[in-house]
Amino acid sequence: MIDIILSVLKENNINEYIVSKTIEESIELYLIKKDLDMNRKKNITQYEVKLFKEFSEGDIRYKGDSRIKIYESMDKHEIEEVIKSASYAASFVKNKIYKLPKGYSGEKKIKESKLLNLSLEDIALKVKNALYKYDNFEKGFINSSEIFVTKIDKRIISSNGTDASYIRCSINGEFITQWIEKQDVEIYNSFNYDELLEEDLALKAKEAIIITGYRARSENAPKNGIYDVILVEDSVKEFFKYYSENALTEMVYQKYSNFNVNDKVQGRKIKGDKLNITLTSIVPFSNEGIELKDRVLIEDGVLKTFYGSYKFADYLGVEPVGDYKAVKIKGGKTSEDDMFEENNLKILRFSDFQMDTLTGDFSGEIRLALLKCGDKFIPLTGGSLSANIKDVQEKLSLSKELQEDGANEMPSQIKLKNVKIAGL
């Protein structure tokens, strides 16, 4: 099929293109409590063509582009029709001229993983057993779950000499924990792994059930005031999105971000832990075939590189390093236990926590928090948090302990000083 696509592109004088072939195999399990309710298996092959067309209006040169999907059921005539249509559509896209990157050409990249030695069915069964391993509480349990195991085999070819391919396996899913006591409470949870970490998942599910029990016993909101606040898990990932998104070439070129390489993006008077962030990737190549090697994004609070769209990288005159979807963030000096001090508020779950990367404002409605009072941890629910990252980043504390979410690795907890909480 790829040979047919390439021949059609050549016959229609389309000289710049990126063609990809993706074979996706997956198995899905849907469970009610511990019982399998439904399972589903997929095997899909799909082709994608991104073609480029240069044209002029007056003295101005443009490069348009268009993206189409091609399926194995299509014959050469059908492929030619959609490619001609896409080429015509590209002539209306007025992007400034830019160069396509030269990507990788070589052997297929296969990341070493235990997942590659097992069938998708075996992996899914191991994930199920791990998820329910500690589901033996009297009042709390996993109400339902969904498990997805996926294997991707992808090849990328471009007119610029790229011929890159890789195989990747992944595990992800979600589960609802329930606790019935004073209240009947349910909490949504999710997981994402590039490796089979059975005990890690088992402990994650156990902790989720315990947290749901705290929520069932919580009745009051925290009092209005200023607190040292601890964020955990997903809210930590959302918080750090401010730095990674503001370093995108697209954001910088369009003036949405004022980040510059060698800027002290964490502030000039850092009294807490300094940020050290490395770009990493869930796949070895970008969609253009650029090899995605680990790269330092921020070192001791100082921005070291931009990354992202090759088009905007060319506009900025910087190296097109590719578009990364994950980061590794170095841990700090403080353990989770030592971080949780008297009168600190640890927010375990938000109804919704969001970071506005344009302004640095972040906020969320508190679904469950623990207030430390002596040896007691008081469960609280309700109220909200709101602050700006520029007011807290210089005194940021990072936990020694790390959390993994797919290719992401970062502190499991962070502490923010003097944050306003709207409560009772």
Image (cartoon, grey):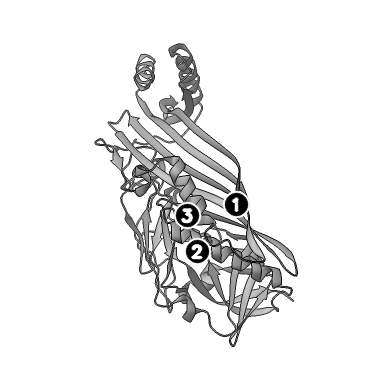
N-terminal of the pair, mark 1 or mark 3, is: 1
- Relative horizontal placement of residue 109, taking residue 422 as reference (left or right): left
Q: Is residue 144 left or right of residue 54?
A: right
Q: Amino acid at mark 2?
A: Leu
Q: Secondary structure at mark 2?
A: helix
Q: Residues within 10 Å of mark 2 (few under 14, many from 20)?
A: some
Which residue is painted at 32% across and 54% down in the image? Answer: 294
| Residue receiving disc 1 | 34
- Mark 3 element type: helix
Amino acid carrying mark 3 in the image: Glu
Query: Which secondary structure lies at badge 1?
Result: loop
Tell me where residue 201 appears, x and y as whole percent. 48, 58
Other residues around mark 1 within 10 Å, as few (<14) / some (14–19) / many (≥20): some
Place of residue 152 in the rendered image (x, y in percent of width and height, measured from the top left): 41, 38
Q: Could you tell me the amino acid type at mark 1?
A: Lys
Q: Earlier in the sequence, mark 2 or mark 3?
A: 2
Q: Image quarter for residue 283?
A: top left
Residue 400 is at least partly visible in this image: yes
1 or 3: mark nearer the eye = 1
- Residue 234 seen in render: no
Q: Position of residue 421 (x, y in %)?
A: 66, 74
Residue 245 tag number: 3
- Quadrant where the C terminus is found in the figure: bottom right
Would you say the residues marked 2 and 3 are in contact, meaning their CB atoms lie under 8 Å apart? no
Residue drawn at 34 percent across, 35 percent down: 100
Vertical arrangement, residue 226 with respect to residue 326, above or below: below
Q: Which residue lies at the image location 55% right of the left edge and 43% below the top edge?
A: 29
